[in-house]
Image (cartoon, rainbow, N blue to C red):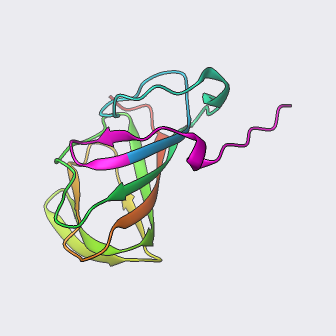
Amino acid sequence: MVIVVRNWRNVHPTIAHKSGLDWRLLGMPAKTSGDIEVEVDPKFQCLKTITYVSLAKLQPTLSYEPHDHQDHEEVYYIISGSGQIKVGGESARFRDGDVIYIPEKAVHSITNDGSEMIEFLAFGGLTGGG
């Protein structure tokens, strides 16, 4: 067994969905449907069914472009900030402390319509769809 520990401060961020910042902390070796273009050091490609764990940030007035994932579901845990999430044809408000579930194949987008940075953890879970 190998213990894997990684601090987000030691990861270079990537632009996610044309507007957000993403610190890919852990991943799996294979790229999944709709995932962002990011390189993960092989020693941090330790996941098997969870596709990724990312710290994400979105500035005020910005939104992720609408996108979907054909082979994995997502969970966002909101650390700070507030905004709006659209999943399929529905939209809802969220704030710090909320958890958001996004099913596979659902077109979704997150918008920061507040005055502070949204900070959240994003988790992907492989479903095998596609």
x and y percent of residue 5 in the render? 73, 43
State yes or no: residue 113 in magenta: no
Residue 13 image position (x, y, % from top left): 42, 41
> With 84 as the anchor, is 37 left or right in this view?
right
Q: Residue furthest right?
A: 1
Furthest residue in direction left, as rendered: 89
In the picture provided, is 129 more to the left or to the right than 77?
A: left
Q: Position of residue 32 (x, y in %)?
A: 40, 28
**Quarter of the picture holding the N terminus:** top right
Say which quarter of the image contains residue 80: bottom left
Against 25, residue 20 (above or below) is below
Range of the magenta residues? 1-21
In front here: 16 or 28? 16
- Residue 37 shown left or right of residue 46 in the figure: left
User: Which picture quadrant has residue 115?
Assistant: bottom left
Residue ID at (35%, 66%):
118
Q: Is 6 a magenta residue?
A: yes
Q: How many marks?
A: 0
At 23% from the left and 74% from the top, the residue drawn is: 92
Q: Residue at x 26, y 72 (%)?
A: 83
